[in-house]
Image (cartoon, grey):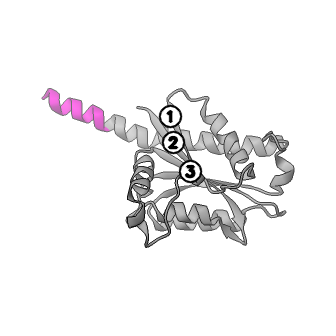
Amino acid sequence: MAIKIVTICGSVRPGNYTAKALAVALDELKKYPEVEVSAIHLEELDLPLPGLEARKPKAIEAFQATVKGATGVILASPEYHGGISSPMKLAIDNLGFPSVLADKPVSILGVAAGVIGAIKSTEQLRGICSHVGALPLPMVVSVAKVQQVFDEDGNCLDENMENLIRSSARNLIEFLKDTVCAKVSLEEILREQGEAH
């Protein structure tokens, strides 16, 4: 069974640090040949504000279909004014009511310029994910002083932080293999046995 991972970057600023941190996780996912990745760039979607969905139904339908087809999701957001970014909140709001994030395992990554990192935004994101029925994983990565962790070319200058981000990506894949994929395999076995009788 192919594992389909959707990543959503909550920053739309050119050269943003959130994308640089997410790139480390994406690089780790490349080590798994069974994993297919769809990286969503919110600046390309032009999603509508809540209540104005009728103006851009095709954009919303395509976005929801991509996330609905995912086995797991990685949400990466910068921390702005003590919370998640408005693009990330807009993305989640456009995933429907009920949300297509429901029952999806979600790995959370946050970045911030301050010394305490993205503690507030990652906790907020965890709460939102739980509220819409998603399954946020226990391991949350918060990158503090992100401007010192990545250079302009996107290279990670902190080996421990790089290992932490890579570990979060691995944890998502291992969780999916142990739960979602195992469940599908069991269902296939039971179905085959039922057809044989």
Instruction: Give the residue drawn at x 63%, y 39%.
Output: 26
The label on residue 5 is: 2
- Kind of residue indicated by mark 2: Ile
Secondary structure mainly formed by the magenta segment: helix
- Kind of residue indicated by mark 3: Glu
Locate residue 80, reporting x and y percent: 71, 67
Q: Secondary structure at mark 3?
A: helix
* Crowd tier of the residue under label 3, counting other residues whose Cα lies within 10 Å: few below 14, some 14–19, many 20 or above: few
Residue range highlighted in magenta: 187-197
> What's the CA distance linking mark 3 and mark 1?
20 Å
Q: Quadrant of residue 2?
A: top left
Contact check, label 2 and label 1, Cβ < 8 Å: yes
Of the pair 104 and 89, the residue shown nearer to us: 89
Instruction: Give the residue drawn at x 51%, y 42%.
Output: 5
Of the pair 57 and 76, the residue shown nearer to us: 57
Q: Secondary structure at mark 2?
A: strand
Contact check, label 3 and label 1, Cβ < 8 Å: no
Locate residue 7, reporting x and y percent: 56, 47
Locate residue 82, reporting x and y percent: 71, 71
Position of the N terminus by quadrant: top left
Instruction: Give the residue drawn at x 66%, y 56%.
Output: 11
Residue 179 highlighted magenta (yes or no)? no
Contact check, label 3 and label 2, Cβ < 8 Å: no
Locate residue 128, reporting x and y percent: 53, 67
* Crowd tier of the residue under label 2, counting other residues whose Cα lies within 10 Å: few below 14, some 14–19, many 20 or above: many
Is residue 75 something that shows in the picture? no
Kindly report which numbered mark, 3 or 2, lies closer to the viewer in this rendering.
Answer: 3
> What's the CA distance linking mark 3 and mark 2?
19 Å
> What's the CA distance linking mark 2 and mark 1?
6 Å
Q: Earlier in the sequence, mark 3 or mark 1?
A: 1
Of the pair 111 and 175, the residue shown nearer to us: 111
125 sits left or right of 144 in the view = left
